[in-house]
């Protein structure tokens, strides 16, 4: 049975990693594959939503008439795309693993190896979730993700408040079978009012289904 809550809603989804270029051949990145975000985008589309999927570098592909895929590489590019699509959206689900920092300077030529040690100055990337949280209008909802290794619930709740989200999806690296590159995930959804919904370990497509049900029943 389709979930009518999402019918004709416009939804922004971010997914995947960002790559922050050091020089023409190197980057700083992370192990995110984008699978969780793709499964969310697909479930939304199957339930009648129009989805703008802003996705970092991935070898996965997605093809659905209700999904517009916007490929980006860096956090700055992801932010630009989100700023473009969010104002027309009813909701944003931010599952991307955005790099917190990028190299302060991009070297236009490949860096040669010389000294025994080598360091790169990094500068902070913008927080896309927080930026969208500041722009959020009354009719819009934002659902973020949090990947924590300690004080998980407390840290996730803090993020939800600081970034002005409506719910945050906690996935823990402490859970066997959950997280980057795995076909499965185990989530807890934390609402702004403090309510917490815990789900068991399951395939990411089933996790996406749980998340949409939770959103439609509580937001
Ligand atoms: O602060 P932290 O990176 O743990 O927050 C995770 C949440 O914030 C995720 O929803 C992620 O997509 C989002 N985020 C973002 N821009 C950043 C960092 C994180 O949108 N620069």
Image: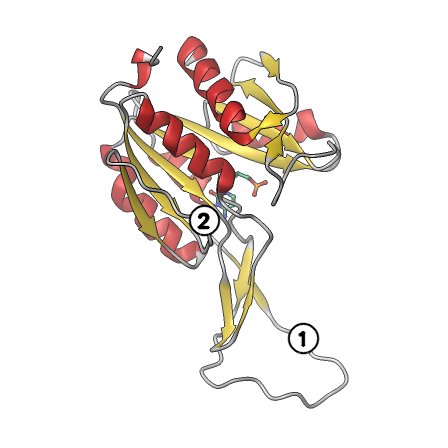
Residue at 65% across, 19% down: 200
Q: Relative to residue 82, is residue 77 depicted above or below?
A: below
Callout in the foreground (2, 1): 2
* Of 148 and 63, the residue lying toward us: 63
Image quarter of the N terminus: top left
For disc 1, the neighbor class at 10 Å (few under 14, some 14 to 19, many from 20) is few
* Residue 218 % position (x, y): 45, 10
Q: Relative to residue 66, is residue 120 depicted above or below?
A: below
* Of 42 and 23, the residue lying toward us: 42
Which of pointers 2 and 1 lies earlier in the amino acid sequence?
Answer: 2
Residue at 26% across, 45% down: 84
The answer to which image quadrant residue 142 occupies is: top left
Q: Is residue 45 left or right of residue 215?
A: left
Residue at 43% across, 38% down: 38
Q: Relative to residue 57, is residue 193 depicted above or below?
A: above
Say which residue label 2 marks.
Answer: 60
Q: Is residue 161 left or right of residue 67?
A: right
SS of the residue under disc 2: loop
Does residue 142 appear in this view? yes
* Residue 80 % position (x, y): 32, 52
SS of the residue under disc 1: loop
* Residue 153 % position (x, y): 67, 25
Q: What number is the disc on residue 119?
A: 1
Q: Is residue 145 left or right of residue 199?
A: left
**Image colouring:** secondary structure
Does residue 94 appear in this view? no
The answer to which image quadrant residue 151 occupies is: top right
């Amino acid at each position: 049975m389709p979930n009518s809550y999402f019918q004709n809603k416009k939804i922004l989804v971010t997914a995947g990693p960002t790559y922050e270029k050091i020089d023409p051949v190197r980057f700083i990145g992370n192990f995110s594959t984008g699978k969780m975000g793709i499964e969310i985008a697909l479930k939304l589309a199957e339930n009648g939503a129009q989805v703008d999927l802003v996705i970092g570098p991935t070898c996965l592909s997605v093809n659905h008439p209700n999904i517009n895929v916007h490929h980006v590489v860096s956090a700055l590019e992801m932010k630009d795309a989100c700023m473009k699509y969010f104002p027309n959206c009813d909701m944003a689900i931010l599952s991307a693993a955005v790099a917190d920092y990028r190299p302060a300077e991009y070297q236009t030529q490949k860096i040669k190896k010389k000294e025994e040690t080598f360091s790169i100055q990094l500068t902070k990337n913008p927080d896309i979730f927080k930026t969208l949280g500041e722009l959020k209008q009354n009719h819009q909802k934002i659902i973020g993700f949090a990947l924590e290794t300690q004080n998980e619930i407390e840290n996730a709740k803090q993020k939800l408040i600081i970034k002005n989200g409506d719910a945050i999806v906690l996935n823990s690296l402490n859970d066997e079978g959950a997280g980057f590159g795995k076909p499965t995930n185990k989530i807890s959804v934390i609402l702004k009012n403090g309510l917490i919904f815990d789900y068991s370990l399951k395939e990411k497509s089933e996790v996406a289904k749980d998340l949409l049900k939770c959103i439609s029943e509580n937001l």
